Image (spheres, rainbow, N blue to C red):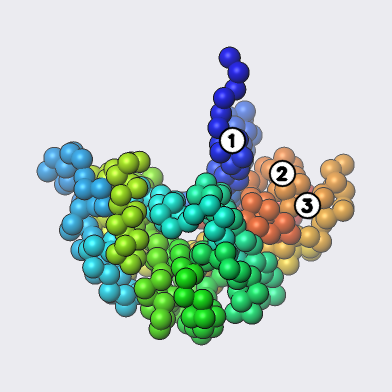
């Protein structure tokens, strides 16, 4: 029978992070000792107090369909969290709970974008942004940033990228993959540009807000003039080590939230009941309950920067959040190692997988072909061994 896959799915890129993780699993199944530094997944176990809340929810028989936009008491906990951590006032009718922050992003794209609408993506950007925009028939517009400016877009770059077709700007802070954190002054600079263009909306992906070593997180929705045009996206996967529980959420203008609820009602309906009950407990707890993980990520960042800094050809900056480093490795382009010519970051990443048995992700997937992403969401023992292997094969 002939292949009748849609053009939509044929033209979609496979997630590079998930593809590399799958390749690493395949090689492990073949008996190879692969160290995986490709996935953005904390290696910590979920804190016990959250597990206990999930067990209680099971015992209390939370097994029925959930409201499409989330339980009311979970949305109340999210509203309180926004006020406590971000100084943002979102009512329950402005909050939508989804099956992970990735679905939240997809919902927003489908609700706002029309065919041909442009979305500005400061590059590097999270691997799925571009294809989500394309699925919504929008046009991704990359704005290249450099390691010398910590991979952050300037107001001048934003202004230059805006056209009459620009509808949105998407960015993350702390950033996946670069770990960059926008300061309040930097966000104010971007906001000043956007004030001149009132029909452009902002998606602020803040999933890594607590994994922040810069001294405090700032939400662009809290900048003067930005609240009514910003969608704040968050979730529990990263800071609470709950990647598999699949709970994300937005705070947004009510008309956007209603649109997302309408869409979600036809796609997945409400998110998992047990996970939602557990997330209430997670969000109501003080941030101090997860501080041990944040402190450990900070230590690992310093360890990784120190070890990679010993390898000639790695150009590094100091990421201020998340759990990634994003070194420029273009010094290796054109060189031949073990008979393999390195032409680009993809070649380099595959070389490390084959010869060092270390899985990383090419920067090409994030809009920067000169870099690779290395996740330090792994044990110190694994990180030391992985970088030792990398050094040996280079």
Q: Residues within 10 Å of mark 2 (few under 14, many from 20)?
A: some
User: Between tags 2 and 1, which lies in front?
Assistant: 1
Q: Residues within 10 Å of mark 1 (few under 14, many from 20)?
A: few
Q: Is residue 22 visible?
A: no
User: Between tags 3 and 2, which lies in front?
Assistant: 3
Q: Residues within 10 Å of mark 3 (few under 14, many from 20)?
A: many
Q: Which mark is residue 7?
A: 1
Residue 123 place in picture, x, y as percent: 63, 63
Quadrant in which the N terminus appears:
top right
Mark 1: secondary structure = helix
Mark 3: secondary structure = loop
Q: Is residue 279 visible?
A: yes
Q: Residue at x 38, y 61 (%)?
A: 234
Disc 1 to disc 3: CB gap under 8 Å? no
Name the N-terminal-most of marks 3 and 2: 3
Q: Which mark is residue 350?
A: 2
Q: Residue furthest front?
A: 164
Name the N-terminal-most of marks 1 and 3: 1
Q: Which residue is mark 3?
A: 344
Residue 41 place in picture, x, y as percent: 47, 51
- In the image, taking residue 64 as reference, residue 36 lies left or right, namely right
Q: Residue furthest top?
A: 1
Front residue of this view, candidates 63 and 301: 63
Front residue of this view, candidates 386 and 188: 188
Q: Which mark is residue 87?
A: none
């Amino acid at each position: 029978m002939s292949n009748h896959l849609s053009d939509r799915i044929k033209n979609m890129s496979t997630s590079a992070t998930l593809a590399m993780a799958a390749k690493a699993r395949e090689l492990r199944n073949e008996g190879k000792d692969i160290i995986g530094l490709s996935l953005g997944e904390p290696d910590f176990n979920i804190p016990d107090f959250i597990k206990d809340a999930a067990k209680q929810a099971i015992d209390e028989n939370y097994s029925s369909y959930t409201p499409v936009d989330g339980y009311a008491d979970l949305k109340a906990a999210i509203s309180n969290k926004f006020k406590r951590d971000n100084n943002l006032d979102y009512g329950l009718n402005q909050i939508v709970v989804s099956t992970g922050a990735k679905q939240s992003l997809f919902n927003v794209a489908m609700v706002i974008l029309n065919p041909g609408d442009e979305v500005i993506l400061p590059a590097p950007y999270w691997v799925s942004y571009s294809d989500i925009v394309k699925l919504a028939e929008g046009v991704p517009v990359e704005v290249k940033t450099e390691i010398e400016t910590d991979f952050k877009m300037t107001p001048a770059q934003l202004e230059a990228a805006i056209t009459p077709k620009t509808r949105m700007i998407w960015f993350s802070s702390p950033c996946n993959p670069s770990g960059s954190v926008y300061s309040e002054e930097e966000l104010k600079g971007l906001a000043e540009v956007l004030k001149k263009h009132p029909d452009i909306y902002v998606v602020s992906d803040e999933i890594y807000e607590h994994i922040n070593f810069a001294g405090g997180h700032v939400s662009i929705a809290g900048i003067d003039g930005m609240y009514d045009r910003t969608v704040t996206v968050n979730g529990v996967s990263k800071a609470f080590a709950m990647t598999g529980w699949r709970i994300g959420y937005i705070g947004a203008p009510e008309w956007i939230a209603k649109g997302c609820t309408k869409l979600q009602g036809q796609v997945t309906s409400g998110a998992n009941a047990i996970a939602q009950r557990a997330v209430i407990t997670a969000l109501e707890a003080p941030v101090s309950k997860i501080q041990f993980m944040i402190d450990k990520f900070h230590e690992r960042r310093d360890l990784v920067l120190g070890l990679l800094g010993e390898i000639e050809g790695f150009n590094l900056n100091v990421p201020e959040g998340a759990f990634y480093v994003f070194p420029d490795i273009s010094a290796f382009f054109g060189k031949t190692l073990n008979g393999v010519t390195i032409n680009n970051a993809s070649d380099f990443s595959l070389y490390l997988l084959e010869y060092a048995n270390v899985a990383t992700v090419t920067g090409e997937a994030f809009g920067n072909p000169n870099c690779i992403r290395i996740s330090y969401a792994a044990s110190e023992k694994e990180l030391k061994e992985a970088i030792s292997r990398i050094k040996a094969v280079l």
